[in-house]
Image (spheres, rainbow, N blue to C red):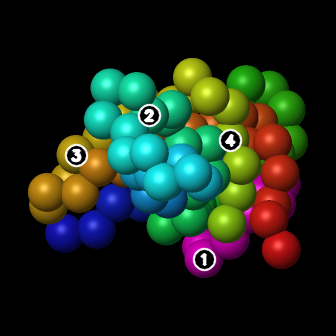
Amino acid sequence: MNIKPLGDRVLIKSCESEETTKSGIVLPGSAQEKPQMAEVLAVGPGGVVDGKDVTMHVKAGDKVIYSKYAGTEVKFDGEEMILVRQNDILAIVE
């Protein structure tokens, strides 16, 4: 089975956050910040969304920075992913 986002939605998977600080202190899971960098897994078709014409600017494989509290967390085949709207993506990392 495959997930295909609809409209201007983008399926992303968060990159792993660092578990130790630069000085070598190991951080427990509760003290770690939610990572804001992710890899794009799938992109919706765009088109007319909420009465506006939307062109998709990201593609599968891109590394992106997204809003901290954006999206809906989805668990699929044991993997945690996030489904966000394209306007919640702030930048593409090159």
Query: Which residue is more in the foreground, 87 or 53?
Result: 87
Query: Which residue is more in the foreground, 64 or 54?
Result: 64
Q: Quadrant of residue 9?
A: top right
Q: Residues within 10 Å of mark 4 (few under 14, many from 20)?
A: many
Separation of residues labelled 1 and 3 (CA atoms): 19 Å
Separation of residues labelled 2 and 4 (CA atoms): 17 Å
Separation of residues labelled 3 and 2 (CA atoms): 20 Å
- Of marks 3 and 2, the one in the foreground: 2
Question: Is there CB contact under 8 Å for labels 4 and 1?
Answer: no
**How far across and down, in percent of the image, does residue 58 sit?**
74, 63
Q: Secondary structure at mark 2?
A: loop
Q: Quadrant of residue 87?
A: top right
| Pointer 1 or 3: first along the chain | 1
Separation of residues labelled 2 and 1 (CA atoms): 25 Å
Give the residue pinned by disc 1: 61
Give the residue pinned by disc 3: 75
- In magenta, the rendered stretch is 55-62
The numbered mark at residue 32 is 2
